[in-house]
Structure formats: C-alpha cells, structure tokens
C-alpha cells in the first residue's frame, strides 16, 4: 500500500466517525506488529492526525458529522434546550426531564457530575476528569440552539 492509496481510503468520507472506522481498519492491516511496516503505519497516523487537527469538514461540506446532524435534527424542535456540539459529541442541557426517554432512545447518556446529557463515544473513565469548559477549549464548541425563547414585542 502506498501513501496515495492510504489517502484515497479517506476520500469522500462523511464525518469523523467514518474516518475513525477507516483508521481502525487500516491500522489493523498496517501496524508493524501484524506484518505492516513502520513507514506505512506512520503515514496512516500522519494522514489521520491531519484530518483531526485541521477540522476537515469532509465531502458533504457540513460542519458536523452526518451522524451528529441526524441526531440534532431529531431533538432540535424541543423547546428550552441548549444543544452544543463539542468535538464529536453533542451535549444537552436545559429542560431535558420531560424528554429523557426520547434521549435514551437516541443513545444519549446522562453525565451525572456535569448534570447534562451527551451523545458520542467515550473512551473510558479518565482519572483526571475534565470540566465541560476544559473539554470545549480542547475540542472546540458550537452552540446549535439555546434555550432562550424569543419574546414578541407589542408595537
């Protein structure tokens, strides 16, 4: 496999989750411990890190991963929610009590210490748990919806 062939595997992907999947598949083939070469494995890591670090928005030219867009579209109509995309996770706060069953159905999980719901893969327990602000500063954050209701003014 060449550098170009590795790059081609990442062409036309639709989001970070798809990039992760491709990376894992290639890593299983190219890792030196399973018969791959150091050089090819370093190339794979270099390409994958470039994708992550540069915030490439992929072929659909969307800011968010396609999977995250689908999930957001299913909760966007609820009122009094704050929806924030932080890295490859969705964080929800606001009035979520009435829709908790819907959130569970969509595979959201409750973060009891942060008192918020999140959607996305967590790699495991971090002994040095970070605040949401620390997570936002590391991965970036975009607020999709705030819980403010628009007030109609009388003329």
Image: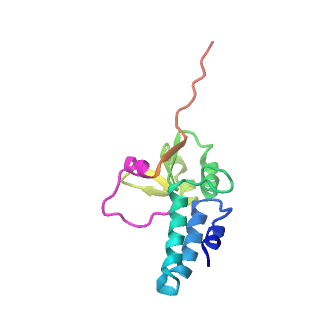
* Residue in the picture at 58% in, 28% down: 150
Which quadrant of the rendered structure holds the C terminus? top right
In the foreground, 109 or 139: 139
Which quadrant of the rendered structure holds the N terminus? bottom right
Magenta residues (range): 119-138
In the foreground, 82 or 52: 52
Residue 102 quadrant: bottom right
| Residue 144: x %, y % from top left | 56, 43
- Residue 44 in view (yes/no): yes
35 falls in the magenta region: no
Q: Residue furthest bottom?
A: 35
User: Is the stretch drawn in magenta largely helix, strand or loop?
Assistant: loop
- Residue 115 in view (yes/no): no
* Residue in the picture at 54% in, 71% down: 44
Q: Residue furthest top?
A: 155
* Residue in the picture at 47% in, 48% down: 140
> Does residue 63 appear to the left or right of 122 in the view shown?
right
135 falls in the magenta region: yes
| Residue 152: x %, y % from top left | 60, 22
In the foreground, 27 or 153: 27
| Residue 20: x %, y % from top left | 55, 67
In the foreground, 145 or 3: 3
């Amino acid at each position: 496999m060449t550098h170009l062939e590795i790059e081609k595997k990442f062409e036309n992907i639709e989001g970070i989750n798809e990039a992760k999947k491709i990376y894992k598949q290639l890593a299983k083939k190219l890792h030196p411990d399973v018969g791959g070469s150091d050089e090819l494995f370093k190339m794979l890591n270099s390409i994958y890190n470039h994708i992550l670090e540069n915030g490439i928005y992929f072929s659909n030219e969307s800011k968010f991963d396609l999977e995250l867009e689908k999930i957001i579209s299913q909760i966007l109509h609820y009122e009094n929610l704050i929806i924030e995309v932080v890295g490859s996770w969705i964080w929800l706060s606001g009035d979520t009590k009435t829709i908790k069953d819907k959130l569970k159905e969509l595979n959201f999980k409750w973060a009891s210490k942060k008192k918020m719901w999140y959607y996305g893969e967590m790699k495991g327990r971090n002994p040095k748990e970070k605040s949401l602000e620390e997570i936002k500063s590391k991965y970036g954050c975009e607020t999709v919806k705030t819980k403010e209701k628009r007030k109609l003014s009388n003329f």
